[in-house]
Image (cartoon, grey):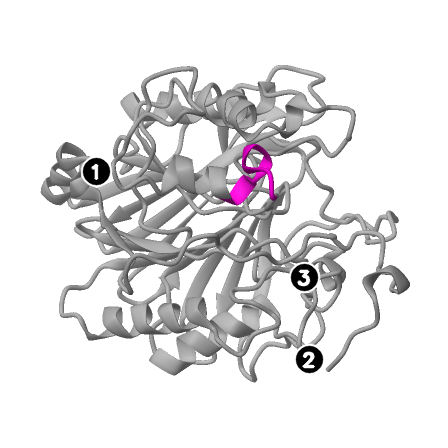
Amino acid sequence: MSQPPASSVTYPECVEHGVWVPIPTNPPDDELRLRLKDVDADESRNIKQRGVMSFHAVGCSGFYENQEPGKRVAGAMADQISKPQAYGGTRDAAPASFLFHLGDLAYKDENPANVEAKNQALIYNAQFYAQYTKYAREIFAIPGNHDGKSSKHQSKSGIEHFQENFCDPNRGQSPDNATDRRKAMCQPYPYWRLETPITTIIGLYTNDINGGQLDDPMSDDKPQYRWLVKTLADIKQRTERKVLVLALHYPPYSGGANFRERGDPNLGPTPRRGQLQPLAVLLRQAYAQTNQYPDIVLSAHAHLYQRITYQHADGREMPYMIVGSGGHPPVENLFETCTKGELERRPPPLDLVLPPRSELPSGDTAKVVAYNDSDFGFARITVDINENTLSGEFFTAFRSDATSEVVPGLADSFVLDLKKHKLQK
């Protein structure tokens, strides 16, 4: 199906104008797996002995103009490495084993006059290495839409620098790091899976397209979707039960007033062949195809916090967390519409806002059960295989309007019973 020229099409105000770009290298193998013990053997051993693992998750932490909010968030997470009970939260939490970044580590300034703010080396040093220099644990990541931008000039190409900083098989010192001795990470590819003694984390790459997509919208070949299905099928077949976490940048679901437009991959200038399925539909198809479901889904992109409870027709409950308040201002207003109007503010639970062609299957329900659209903050996930529980927490770290100092503190929490796959009341 041919499309009219992008210049002749107008889109709603909130629609993003990112364009899907290919990953500049081919995947090294079809497994795309990294084991924590090959990166941090001591921490992997500690997790195995305890049967408990905590890790941090956050996205959208970079900003070319002011890194103070992101530094506050990073500093609060760093405190929980040595003091897991810092700022409240579950007593069962262990010292954080690592940070899994949900994308948008580095943002360039789109102003043509600001040349330095397009240099990816300077951007990564200021917005990532300097910001996280006190975070004394390994950091894994998936690219967000800003990390996935491409340029014919290598110094300005976000996706090439993401791979340089996170996909270095030799774990050398990145030339982008002028701050400390943190080594580049050795992830196999921008989409990949991390194996720990008690969890598997699948990280997907949703590219730079309004609403997010897994694969080239102009191609019939779907390598990332095929890899996801194969990975889920492999997990389904193994005898060892691990908690399964799915991580991606664009949120599959949201209660945001603008998500009908922001979640639709058929809006925006990316060329496409026919109508695209929204991200949530692609994920549901992969789950159904393999009969393998994640225990929790993490995402970012929207600069706020939301927690959604998705209940399947069979009663299984699955939490979805949007943790995009890692430092990029402003924190988004959940009730602001695509045309910059504002709906009446309401407490949770709230209905989802669904893009076209993404209606929930018969018998399934989903609600926004918690949100914070005023503060920067981060999530901590704790898996306890002794108790068969997964705990999720959201901590605030910095007031969005900076009108007053904020002591980091617990703002939302839940416990998922992994045997019953029900949220504890």
In terms of sequence position, does the residue under pointer 1 or pointer 3 come before the other?
1
In the rendered structure, find residue 332 and report the number of the disc placed on it.
Answer: none
Residues at marks 2 and 3 touching, judged by CB atoms closer than 8 Å? no
Q: Is residue 245 above or below residue 144?
A: below
Q: Is residue 140 above or below residue 125?
A: below
Q: Which residue is mark 2?
A: 274
* Amino acid, disc 2: Gly
The region drawn magenta spans: 152-159
Q: Is residue 370 left or right of residue 10?
A: left
Residue 141, x across and y down, in percent: 41, 42
Q: CA distance from mark 1 to mark 3?
A: 35 Å
For the C terminus, the quadrant is bottom left
Q: CA distance from mark 1 to mark 2?
A: 43 Å
Q: Quadrant of residue 253?
A: bottom right
Q: Which residue is mark 3?
A: 263
Find numbered disc 2 in the image and state the secondary structure of the residue it sits on.
Answer: loop
Residue 44, x across and y down, in percent: 16, 40
Residue depth check, mark 1 versus mark 2: number of the one nearer the observer: 2
Residue 165, x across and y down, in percent: 40, 35
Q: Which residue is mark 1?
A: 39
Q: Nearer the viewer, residue 90 or 9?
A: 9
* Amino acid, disc 3: Gly
Q: Residues within 10 Å of mark 1 (few under 14, many from 20)?
A: some
